[in-house]
Amino acid sequence: MSATLGVLLRRLMPHASISIFECLDQVAAESSDAWNNAGTGHSAFCELNYTPLIDGKVDIGKALDIAQRFEVSKQLWAYLKQKELIAYDDPFINSIPHMSFVWGEENVNFLRKRFEAMREAPIFRDMRYSSDRNEIAEWVPLMMEGRDNSAPLAATKMDAGTDVNFGAITRGMIDYLNRSDRVDLQLGHSVAGFEKQPNGRWKLEVENLGRKEKREVYADYVFIGAGGGSIPLLEKTGIEEAQGYAGFPISGQFLQCTNTEVIQRHNAKAYGKAAVGSPPMSVPHLDTRIIEGQRTLFFGPYAGFSTKFLKSGSYLDLPLSLEMHNVWPLMAAGIQNVGLTTYLIKQVVQSPEDRFAELLAYYPTAKMEEWTLTIAGQRVQVIKKDKDSGGVLKFGTEIVCAADGSIAALLGASPGASTSVSIMLEVIARMFPNEIASPEWQQTIREMIPIFGTSLIEDGDLCLATRRRTNAILGLKG
């Protein structure tokens, strides 16, 4: 997110000075790192939780929004590649089919309804549906071998799906910024405090973690894009808009396949349906990944509980984030989401055999000795104060911005990075409302993102033409 914002501002404000502070000794080592997330270019092709069943009808509104936002992200990435602004040894984005895979009569009926609803939209027009076991076996042979033939099953497939190494694209963008004039990258530096000055500027207390030295930095505008670590930083700003926000950390785990022959036989991100009572982030998937040119295979996710907001964080992160303004929202959200608490407890006490049993539901002939447990990144779910219920658990992303637009923060998780360009354009619109409306900024944005201000949902021809163009530049199918 921060790298994306930096790139956009660098093109929009070439004479501005930009300082980037990162507490670790490298960038993109937390949630953006390829090993810490599923790498799914979240385009709503396969994630069933984005298309809920409401009053007997499948609501595809959220899926349409996410799919369009991902196409916006691809436009910026295509621009960066075309202009040779970022360098990389291996492609940071690869074509991997996105599939939904379900069994049982009720789930098959739902998937068929979902397919019929989504096919009406041009952005999903290339989606295929099948309940034919032989055809599905051609798509995902591993998932069909040894499977019980008694239960009905079905799958959808989008060949336009992708796998994204968000760590690679982030490092590429930061490297571009670091090579630019008037951009200062400070690794191993932590922001310890914020103070609004009478003249409207912000004074930041910045600590060099290696030297244990502190200094003051002044800025007209501040963006907090520290992943799970954004909440404690946001609290330090003291802005009224930060009141009532809390975070609940959830750690992630995946099973990783060690057999190269098995890895080569699966070519899909195949998403299933979360078990009844499980939260949306628990949607199981058998997931092909390509990381630094190497193909691998994951299954998960499995959740755990840690009070850390970041993998490199402190176990005191959660308790130290609690203040008078957010204790009740956190408690109220917990009371309303007993199912999440129960789910986490079950996940924490899971044995290796229990985890493997879940894999067998998707890959019936899997061998336990060919899979190893991998620890993924920390996800901090946003909890927001609510006047009716006290507090609500938010499963998406949340922009918190001061009334004067001088400071903003991004909270939340999925679909996150996949929609980063649209989200950062929203941040820019809230921090620079007059500038973004100017002809100069509009022209610059459209140079990077030609579809800016138009709807790919409503204009089917534009949608398909845009996808063909960016796919050609990025070396993708379709």
Image (spheres, rainbow, N blue to C red):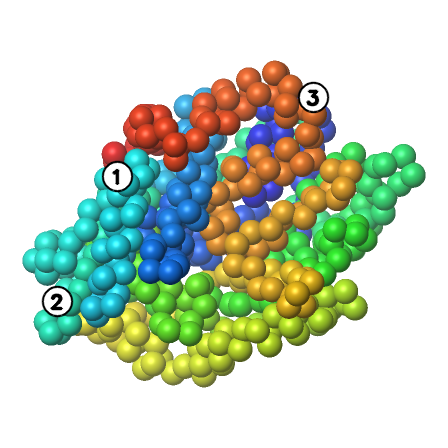
Q: In the displayed image of the protein, which residue is found farthest to the front?
A: 55
Identify whether 5 is placed above or below 224. above
- The x and y percentages for residue 148 are 13, 74
Q: Element under label 3? A: loop
The CA distance from mark 1 to mark 3 is 43 Å
Q: In the displayed image of the protein, which residue is found farthest to the right?
A: 198
Q: Which residue is mark 3?
A: 15
The CA distance from mark 1 to mark 2 is 29 Å
- The x and y percentages for residue 103 are 22, 67
Residue at point 78%, 34% (across, down)? 220
Q: Which residue is mark 1?
A: 125
Q: Give the number of the mark in front: 1 or 2.
A: 1
Q: Which residue is mark 2?
A: 145
Identify the image quadrant of the N terminus: top right
How crowded pointer 2 is (Cα within 10 Å; few <14, some 14-19, many 20+) is rated as: some
Kindly indicate whether the residue at mark 2 contacts the one at mark 1 (C-beta within 8 angstroms): no
Residue at point 10%, 71% (across, down)? 149
Kindly indicate whether the residue at mark 3 contacts the one at mark 1 (C-beta within 8 angstroms): no
Identify whether 283 is placed above or below 24. below
**Kind of residue indicated by mark 3:** His
Instruction: Confirm whether residue 226 shows in the render.
Output: yes
Earlier residue among tags 1 and 3: 3
**Kind of residue indicated by mark 1:** Arg
Q: Element under label 2? A: loop
How crowded pointer 1 is (Cα within 10 Å; few <14, some 14-19, many 20+) is rated as: some
